[in-house]
Each structure stands twice: as C-alpha cells, then as structure tokens.
C-alpha cells in the first residue's frame, strides 16, 4: 500500500513539474507627466480638434463658456494631451470630471479604455490640462472627457467631449 501511494504521489509530482506554468504579464498602467508648453504649442495641439465656444442661448446652466480637448504625437511613443475648460465669471471650480485615454488596434475595432483620470479641478473659473503619456505603438488613440464647471452646490454644468485620433 505504501509503495502504491508513493508511486501515485511521485507520478503527480512529475506531471506538475512537466506542465508549463504560464504567468500572465500585467501591463503596467502608464502615469502621465505634466507637459510644459508655450501658449503657441498649446494652441497648436488644440488646433487638431474643434474648440467650442458655447452660445448663451444654448447653455442650460450658463457656466461653461469655452471648452476643448485634443491630442498630438511627440516622438515615437509620446502622446500629448491638451485641454481646457473655461467658465463664466461666476464659476468657482472648473476642470474635468473625467479624462479617459482610449485605444484601438484598427479603424474597424472598437475603442477600449486604456487609462482613466478623474476629478481634475481647480478652484478658479478656468482649467488648463497639459499632459504627456508614453504609449505602446500599433494603436490608434483618442481622449474622451467630461468638462466641469461649478458655481455653487446647486449650479453645476458638465459637457462630454472627444479629441481627434492619433495613430502610433
């Protein structure tokens, strides 16, 4: 009996040592860096996409005056992100509720979230976003965001927006 039990245990040990062990390599989520840009460089990135000025007749809460988000390519794998949320004079907090970098393998593929940043605010009426992010090649990238402006606890405005598309 001992011999049979020993044989079974030995056989199981041999099988487990022969079976290759696969470890999933987790992709490290990139951290974005502050991007120092001149006003001309910032405007050049924003020129890649539409800069919206909100008409007072179409605004429900009259808090966001202008907003924009755009991306550009720098070097072989650096994505530059530029955005702004400009509130009216009575706005006390502005920025982005959410900024999502998305990617896809081809034009026919669907977008998937690559990295998400939330609650990017400043206690003034205008927020400027200038960041860079190192990304892998072989994808198309875009940024979606929610512009945010707050006058008081009862008066908040949010506007969805989407950047241009860049191929790496």
Image: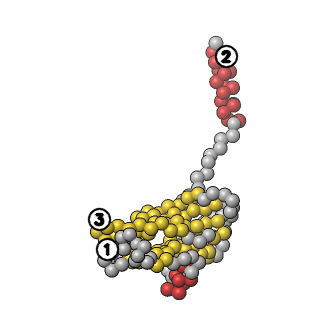
Q: Residue furthest top?
A: 1
Badge 2 or badge 3: first in the primary sequence: 2
Q: For the residue carrying disc 1, how many other residues have a C-alpha within 10 Å: few (<14), some (14-19), or many (20+)? A: some
Q: Is residue 21 above or below residue 56?
A: above
- Up the image or down, 35 lies above or below 114; here it is below
Mark 2 or mark 3, which is nearer to you? 3
Whether residue 25 sits left or right of residue 53 in the image: it is right
Q: Give me the disc on residue 92.
A: 1
Q: Earlier in the sequence, mark 1 or mark 2?
A: 2
Give the x, y percent position of residue 83. 49, 75
Q: Residue at x 57, y 62 (%)?
A: 102
Q: Is residue 68 visible?
A: yes
Q: Which residue is mark 2?
A: 4
- Residue tagged 3: 154
Give the alpha-carbon distance from disc 1 to disc 2, as whole Å: 79 Å
Residue 54 coordinates in the image, percent (x, y): 44, 76
What residue do we see at 33% from left, 80% from top? 89
The Cα atoms of the two marked residues, 3 and 1, are separated by: 12 Å
């Amino acid at each position: 009996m001992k011999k049979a039990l020993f044989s079974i245990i030995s056989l199981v040990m041999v099988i487990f040592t022969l079976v290759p062990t696969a470890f999933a390599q987790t992709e490290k989520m990139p951290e974005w860096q502050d991007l120092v840009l001149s006003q001309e460089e910032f405007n050049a990135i924003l020129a890649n996409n539409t800069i919206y000025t909100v008409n007072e007749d179409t605004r429900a809460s009259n808090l966001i005056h202008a907003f924009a988000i755009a991306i550009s390519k720098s070097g072989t794998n650096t994505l530059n992100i530029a955005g702004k949320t400009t509130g009216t004079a009575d706005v006390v907090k502005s920025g982005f509720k959410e900024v999502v970098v998305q990617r896809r393998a081809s034009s026919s593929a669907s977008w998937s979230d690559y990295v998400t940043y939330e609650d990017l605010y400043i206690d003034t009426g205008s927020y400027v976003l200038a960041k860079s992010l190192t990304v892998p090649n072989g994808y198309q990238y875009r940024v979606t965001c929610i512009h945010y402006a707050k006058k008081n606890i009862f008066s908040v405005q949010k506007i969805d927006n989407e950047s241009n598309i860049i191929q790496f």
